[in-house]
Every structure is written in C-alpha cells, then in structure tokens.
Image: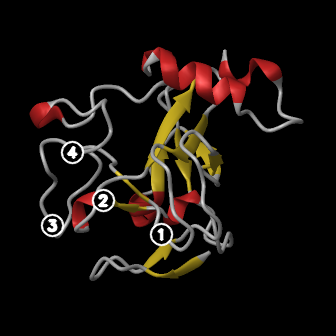
Amino acid sequence: TAKLSLIPGAGTGLFAVDAMPRFTWIGFYPGKVSARVNRKLASHTMGTVRDLYIIADPSVPRGVHLVNEAAGSSGGANVWYVKLPGSGLVLYFAGADVRAGEELLTCYSRTYMKRPYSVPKACADPRCVAAKHRAHSGLDQAPLEWREELRARMPPGLPLGLLS
C-alpha cells in the first residue's frame, strides 16, 4: 500500500500488505518507454537494458515507482530489481523476506541522480561493488540463483520467454 515513507523527506513510499518470501515478484516499473529522459520527471525515470527509459506514469497511484531508496533509511534494501533483456521491462522482486507492513526499499545505484543524502558504498544487494555501488542490473548478469528462483516463481499468464 502507498503511504508516507518512514524516510524523512522521501514523500510517499510503498509498504507490503502481506508478508512476502524472498524472490516474490512485486511488479514491473510502470510507465511509458522513451528514448529520452524527461528532466521534469527524472526522479521517477528508470533506465532499461536497451538504452531506453521508462518514465513513470503519474496517474498510477501505486506501484514499484514508489519504492524508495534504502540509503536514506536506517534499514537496508529488501527489494531488488532486474532489467529484462529485449523487453524494456524492469522487474522488482523481494530480495529478502519482507514482513507485512514493512516499507519496500531498494538501492538505485550511485549514478541514479543527485540526492539530499549520501549513498553507502555497499548495501544488501550483492551486485553492489565498492564505490561503483551497482555493477550491473540486467537479468543476464544477475546471480544464477536469482534467475532460477525468479523463473520458478513467475506468475501464471506471463510469456515464458520473458526471463530468457
């Protein structure tokens, strides 16, 4: 559910309604795929693996675009994301077991945008690499365990090739 984030100054955050085990699919980043960044909406824009950008749709009241960055919190990231090759989609999933009522937090990388807080050199996401913070976020570069678990937990009705 969407409500005021526990992170001071972060605005609206996304909170788990029910407990979610690790690797539970949360959703895809919602919005319009574009070849250019919209500077006015830069804080709600996600890059994909094909040099495209997903600009969040402001009419979507709830969604993974409301997942705030863990760097501004006292806790660590509990949600990770992978960019799906060939689709322009970015999938968010539980990177750790999430308790009901817990705020969903991720790490977006040191290069995401300027922030009013510092970004740590490491976080719970195993892809973080020292000062570079996030090495890669494409599914093809994710740990094998992630690829296998995400395939095993894929919701019914989605194209089988989505995680190829």
Type of amino acid at the residue the image marks with label 3: Tyr
Q: Earlier in the sequence, mark 3 or mark 1?
A: 1
| Residue 64 spot, x, y in % from top left | 56, 58
Against 153, residue 79 (above or below) is below
- Residue wearing tag 4: 110
Q: Earlier in the sequence, mark 3 or mark 2?
A: 2
Disc number lying in front (2 or 4): 2
Task: Decide: few, some or many residues near mark 4? Use Cα within 10 Å; few <14, some 14-19, many ≥20.
Answer: some
Disc number lying in front (3 or 1): 1
In the drawing, what numbered circle is on residue 70? Answer: 2
Q: Secondary structure at mark 3?
A: loop
Type of amino acid at the residue the image marks with label 1: Glu
In the drawing, what numbered circle is on residue 102? Answer: 1
Q: Earlier in the sequence, mark 4 or mark 1?
A: 1
| Residue 18 spot, x, y in % from top left | 65, 66
Against 93, residue 113 (above or below) is below
- Residue wearing tag 3: 117
Disc number lying in front (3 or 2): 2
Q: Secondary structure at mark 1?
A: loop
| Residue 94 spot, x, y in % from top left | 53, 47
Q: Which sits in the foreground, 119 or 47?
A: 119
Side of 77 where 159 appears, left or right: right
